[in-house]
Amino acid sequence: MYKRILMAYDGSEEGRRALFEASDLATMLKAEIHLLAVIPSYAGIMVAEGMIIEDNFDAEKARYQAVLDDALSLLRAKGYTVDGRVAHGEPIDEIVARAKALKADLICVGHRRATTWAQRWWRGSLGKNLIDTSPCSVLIAMTS
């Protein structure tokens, strides 16, 4: 069934829920776990009137690496053999590319429901877009 699980992880409450669901599945199925933290292409850059006024990409990269390292440590402490990497770009594109490279059978992501129309408009739907482009099955772990 599922032998390689790619977990897209951002350190959020929803991400942690997905992390635990993916690890539970991996235990039951004796599957590999691979973590991916994606720094969005716009992260670390502040723009005003068409000019870049701040570029703190190095700080963002360090923050994402720390989030990933925490998740790797947590899973390894529970006895999992797991690897992970930080990528930079459009999250959907990076997740799909990594899933293809790994020949993943399942992608696992966390999701929080948007409660207002403005949130839905601003955030879009990572889950919906991922499902439309994924090379494999997708598990979306929900929080209340």
Image (cartoon, rainbow, N blue to C red):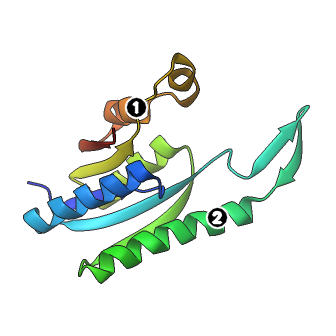
Q: Is residue 84 left or right of residue 89?
A: left
Question: What is the secondary structure assignment of the residue under circle 2?
Answer: helix
State the mark number for residue 50.
Answer: none
Say which amino acid is labelled 2: Lys
Q: Nearer the viewer, residue 117 or 32?
A: 117
- State the mark number for residue 113: 1
The residue that appears at 68% across and 49% down in the rendered structure is 43
Work out which residue is located at the far top of the displayed protein and give it. 117
Task: Say whether marks 2 and 1 touch (CB < 8 Å).
Answer: no
* Whether residue 44 is situated above or below residue 111 in the rendered picture: below
- Crowding at label 1, few (<14), some or many (≥20) Cα neighbours within 10 Å? few
The residue type indicated by label 1 comes to: Arg
Q: Residue at 47% across / 53% down in the picture?
A: 12
Q: Earlier in the sequence, mark 2 or mark 1?
A: 2
**Which quadrant, please, contains the C terminus?**
top left
Q: Quadrant of residue 83?
A: bottom left
Tell me the CA gap for discs 2 and 1. Answer: 27 Å
| Residue 10, x across and y down, in percent | 48, 55
Q: Which residue is mark 2?
A: 61
Above/below status of 52 relative to 83: above
